[in-house]
Image (cartoon, grey):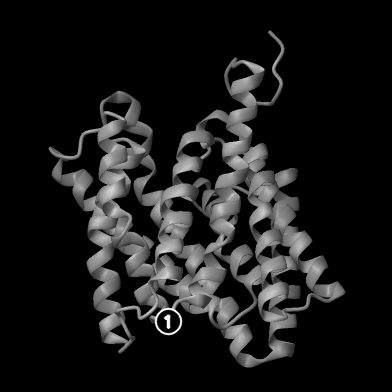
């Protein structure tokens, strides 16, 4: 049977189309996140807390519906999940802070740089030099990041610092993925599935985010719940839900190409809502960094959900 789309297994053309739509809609929903973070009247770290805390009951329902167990987690797994959750909490906190300081397109690109960081880490672990497309990903990543950071510094020091917060977020997200990579791989062998792991990650990350928000003296309780509720629905339920449903069915290259819709949408929202104009060098930098993300996805051996 001929495949209508480059999915990983033989599926009907109709199901392949459904999976592709889910992949694109998931990325679209996640692209709305930075805009909604800007609209919240809490602090940025507080907004990160609410997006996880409000979604937690629904994640439990999704895990139950998928037949994934929530109890009986081995101590070693629990420790790894706790470490990963702290990295994830740091990722969200750093990213949300950066979103308020830099342009939405930059924030989205740098926040998704985990794939490139994992590529670099793979070279360190394997003690080997890059080859072929890997060199291209590195050159594009460094060139694109240098252009975008330079442009941000031209705008203001605050914008540049915001970019750095988003880069740190991408680094912490890579740590999160590396920490839980083994547990995700074991889900087919009776381990905990994607939903149940997300539940436990949220259980550990929520108090960490709340404590950090209180330490920073941020306003915690929203006076306008609409952006906060929209943030958790679009990012944690729709975005994460559709990606968990669709990611495993596509090769890494297709996932990387779909990922590029996020910074594109965020940049359009940044222009429409906040007047964030992109110049020629900005576009070149975003294209280079976006191409590096695609290349990094294309050469990775396993797609991490």
Image quadrant containing the N terminus: top right
> In the rendered view, does 42 fall on the left or right side of 297?
left
Extreme residue toward the bottom, this view: 157
Residue at screen point 23% across, 59% down:
204
Residue 48 x %, y % = 38, 69
Q: On the image, which quarter does residue 87 sit in?
A: bottom left
Q: Is residue 184 above or below residue 163?
A: above
Residue at screen point 19% across, 45% down:
76
Residue 194 x %, y % = 36, 39
> In the rendered view, does 205 fall on the left or right side of 44?
left
Q: Nearer the viewer, residue 184 or 248?
A: 248
Q: Is residue 305 visible?
A: no
> In the rendered view, does 182 fall on the left or right side of 112?
left
Q: Is residue 18 visible?
A: yes
Q: Is residue 29 above or below residue 205?
A: above
Q: How many marks?
A: 1
Extreme residue toward the right, this view: 280
Residue 165 x %, y % = 51, 76
Residue 74 x %, y % = 15, 40
Residue at screen point 33% across, 60% down:
52
Residue at screen point 23% across, 57% down:
203
User: SS at mark 1?
Assistant: loop
> In the rendered view, does 272 fall on the left or right side of 69?
right
Dot 1 crowding, Cα within 10 Å, few <14, some 14–19, many 20+: some
Q: Is residue 161 above or below residue 171?
A: below
Q: On the image, which quarter does residue 53 sit in?
A: bottom left
Q: Nearer the viewer, residue 186 or 112?
A: 112
Q: Nearer the viewer, residue 296 or 72?
A: 72
Residue tagged 1: 41
């Amino acid at each position: 049977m001929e495949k209508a789309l480059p999915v990983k297994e033989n599926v009907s053309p109709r199901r392949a189309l459904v999976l592709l739509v889910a992949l694109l809609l998931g990325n679209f929903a996640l692209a709305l996140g930075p805009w909604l973070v800007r609209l919240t009247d809490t602090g940025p770290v507080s907004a990160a807390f609410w997006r996880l805390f409000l979604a937690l009951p629904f994640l439990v329902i999704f895990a139950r519906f998928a037949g994934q167990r929530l109890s009986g987690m081995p101590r070693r797994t629990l420790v790894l999940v706790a470490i990963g959750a702290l990295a994830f909490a740091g990722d969200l906190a750093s990213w949300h802070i950066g979103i308020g300081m830099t342009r939405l397109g930059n924030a989205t690109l740098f926040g998704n740089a985990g794939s490139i960081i994992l590529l670099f880490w793979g070279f360190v672990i394997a003690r080997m030099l890059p080859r072929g497309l890997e060199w291209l990903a590195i050159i594009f990543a460094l060139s694109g990041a240098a252009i975008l950071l330079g442009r941000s510094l031209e705008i203001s020091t605050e914008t540049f610092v915001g970019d750095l917060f988003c880069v740190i977020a991408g680094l912490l997200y890579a740590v999160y993925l590396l920490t839980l990579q083994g547990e995700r791989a074991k889900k087919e062998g009776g381990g905990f599935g994607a939903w149940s792991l997300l539940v436990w990650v949220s259980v550990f990350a929520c108090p960490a985010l709340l404590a950090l928000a209180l330490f920073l003296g941020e306003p915690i309780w929203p006076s306008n719940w609409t952006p906060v509720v929209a943030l958790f629905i679009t990012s944690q339920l729709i975005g994460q839900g559709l990606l968990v449903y669709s990611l495993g069915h596509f090769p890494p290259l297709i996932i990387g190409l779909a990922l590029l819709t996020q910074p594109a949408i965020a940049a359009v929202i940044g222009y429409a809502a906040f007047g964030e104009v992109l110049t020629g060098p900005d576009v070149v930098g975003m294209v280079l960094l976006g191409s590096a993300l695609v290349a990094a996805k294309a050469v990775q051996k396993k797609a991490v959900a």
